[in-house]
Amino acid sequence: MGEIAPHQNHFIIGLTGNIGTGKSLVRKMLQHLGAYGIDADIVTHEALKPNGPAQEQIIHHFGASTLDTRGAVDREKLAHIVFSDEKALAKLENILHPLVSIGVANMIQHARLPIIIIEAIKLLESGLAGMCDSIWVADAQEQVIFKRLSYERGMDHAEIKERLSHQSSSKNKRQQADVVIENNQDVNKTWQQVTKAWCQTKKKKRNFSVCFNRTSDLIASSKDFLITPSSDNFSTVAELLYKENQPGKHIKWFGDKANLSPDRENRTRQDFTRLVCQHFLFTIPASLKYDNITIWNLSQFELTLLAHYFTNSDMVSNDFKKVVTLIERFGRMHMTQRIIFPIEDHLLKERKSFLRKRGYTGIPSRNVDISYWNKAGYNLYQKKVCDAFDLFSRRT
C-alpha cells in the first residue's frame, strides 16, 4: 500500500490508531524485532521548538500568546485553541503535516536499519501513508481507551470524547489496514499478535523478507544478549529484578515504578512484559542464569541507561566494557545522537577514566531530566554517537 519509490532500500510500515490505543507500545515491540522506529509526534515537537520551522507560522496564525516562557510553542495552549475550532485545527495541520513529512523522509534517508516503523496518529490523513509499504492499525475497546487516558494522562471523560471526535473513526482506519493489532489489557496477547504479523509479512512481502535478512545480519552481534518481551523468561529475569540485598537499589526503584508485584504473578507477568517492551534488557553473558542485567531506554534521539547490576560491580569489569560496546553499537544502528551513562559514586574513578577514554564527557545532573539518578547523586556521562542532521531540510 502506498508508493515507496524514494525508499527502495527500506520496507516502511505505517502505524496508526486513535488516541489511547497504545500505538507507542506496538512501535516499541516492533523495535525489539529489529525495526527502526520513528515517532511523528517527536518530529512535531522538533518543528515547534524555539526557532523551529513551524514557529513563525504558528505565531502568525494563532498569536504570540501560544509561546511558553522558553519561546517554544506551548502545545497545551495550542490544543485548547484548535480542538474547539475545526477551521483552526485544519489550519494547524496544513502547517505541520508538510514539515513532519519532510522530517520523516529525512530520517528514513539517514536510517541504518532497513525496516522502518512510522508511528503517526494522522498517518492516513497526511502525506505519510504514501511512503508506506504496509499500514498497521492499533485498536482497543472503548472502555480500555477511556481507562488508559484517564489513568495515564489525567484526562476526563468529556476531554477524551472531544479528542476522539477530531479523529477519523476506528472503523475507517481498520478498513485501510493491512494489519490490525488489538491492543487491550493483555500485553502478552499484543506481543503475540505483533510477532505473528511480523512473520506473516515476511512470508507475504518479498521486499520485507529481503530487508529482514539484512536486519538479521546487522543485529546478529547483539541478539544473543537481548531479552525479548516474552513471558518464557519471566521467572529468571524477575528473580534478578527482585533479588534481595542486591547493590543495585535503582533496579528495585525501577521495578517499584513499574508496579511490579511478585505476590501477584498474573499481574506481574503483564507488568514485566510491558517493562521489557517499553525498554530494552540484556544479560551478560548470553544466559539468564548469570546475575548481570542492564535496562535502558531508547527515545527518538537519546539512549539512557536506566538500571544495571553486575556481579563484579565494584570495578570496570569485562562485562561492563561489553555493555558499553553493545549499547554504543545498538545506539548507532538506531541513529542515537547521544548516550547517557550514570555512574555510582564509589565506582566513579575507574569508570570515569574508562568512559573518558571512549569519548564520554561529564554533564551536570541538573541538565538532564532523569530525576531518579539525580536524586541518588549519580554522576552522568554522555557521548555523541551519531551526527545530527537538518531534520527539516528539503531533499533535492
Image (cartoon, grey):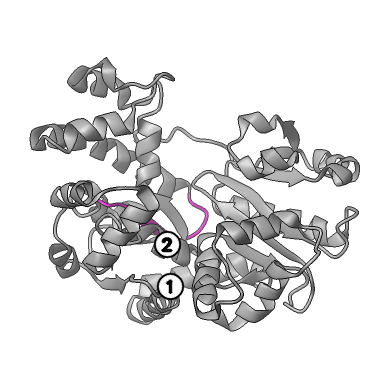
Which residue bears the numbered disc 1? 187
Please state the extent of the stretch shown in magenta in the rendering. Answer: 111-121
Q: Taking the image as drawn, is residue 365 in sight?
A: yes
- Which amino acid type corresponds to the residue marked 2 in the rendered image? Leu
Say which of marks 2 and 1 sits in front: 1
Q: In this view, does 144 lie to the left or right of 108?
A: left
Residue 358 in the figure: left or right of residue 29: right
> Does 91 appear above or below 21?
above
* Pointer 2 with pointer 1, Cβ within 8 A: yes
**Residue 385 visible in the picture:** no
Quarter of the picture containing the C terminus is: top left
Image point 31% across, 61% down: which residue? 147
Residue bearing the label numbered 2: 25
Q: Which quarter of the rendered picture does the N terminus lie within?
A: bottom left
Q: How crowded is mark 1: few (under 14 residues within 10 Å), some or many (20 or more)?
A: many
Residue 211 percent coordinates (x, y): 45, 68
